Amino acid sequence: MRRLVALFFVFATISAAQAEETLKPGDTISGKLRLVETRHPNGTRLRAFQVFVDTPKMFAKEDEFCDGPPKSFHLVAEKPEAAKLRPLLGKKVAVVAEDMMCSETAWHIGDVVVFKWHLAEPPAR
């Protein structure tokens, strides 16, 4: 009986840890911010801010366009958001990803496109 209880505890702990390791809307992603420049197949020049994450995680909800844990997150940024991101290029950032999906088109630069996001509050000192 003790073995059964111990085994149950081990599986419950593993399941809880795995659940915490998934990615869902509202989660914070962190990593190095970079500006990627490329071209769409039609020739249009594309520029995208990307967060290249430190610890890739699988999506909590299955997405047929994901191929493994995403590593690069394309932050959709209009001019005001881009102005906030430019000084942070090359630095580690933390971003709360509120609305995201795995990339589906050539317009999405990275593994995941994040439509709605905001910079996470810096830790209190």
Image (cartoon, rainbow, N blue to C red):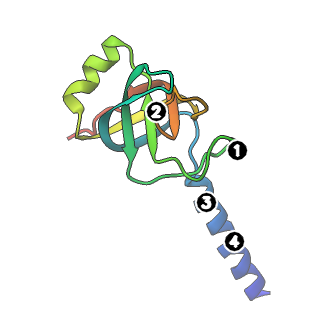
In front: mark 1 or mark 4? Answer: 1
Q: Give the residue at x 19% y 27%.
A: 87
Query: Which is nearer the eye, 6 or 65?
Result: 65
In the visual, does 94 lie left or right of 76?
left
Q: Earlier in the sequence, mark 2 or mark 1?
A: 1
Q: Earlier in the sequence, mark 3 or mark 1?
A: 3
Q: Position of residue 98 (x, y in %)?
A: 52, 28
In front: mark 3 or mark 1? Answer: 1
The quarter of the image holding the C terminus is top left
Q: Amino acid at mark 2?
A: Ile
Secondary structure state at the residue bearing disc 4: helix
Q: Are marks 2 and 4 in contact (CB under 8 Å)?
A: no
Q: Position of residue 41 (x, y in %)?
A: 50, 27
Secondary structure state at the residue bearing disc 1: loop
Q: Are marks 2 and 1 in contact (CB under 8 Å)?
A: no
Q: Real-space Cα distance between discs 3 and 1?
A: 14 Å
Q: Which residue is mark 1?
A: 62
Q: Amino acid at mark 3?
A: Gln
Q: Quadrant of residue 77?
A: top left
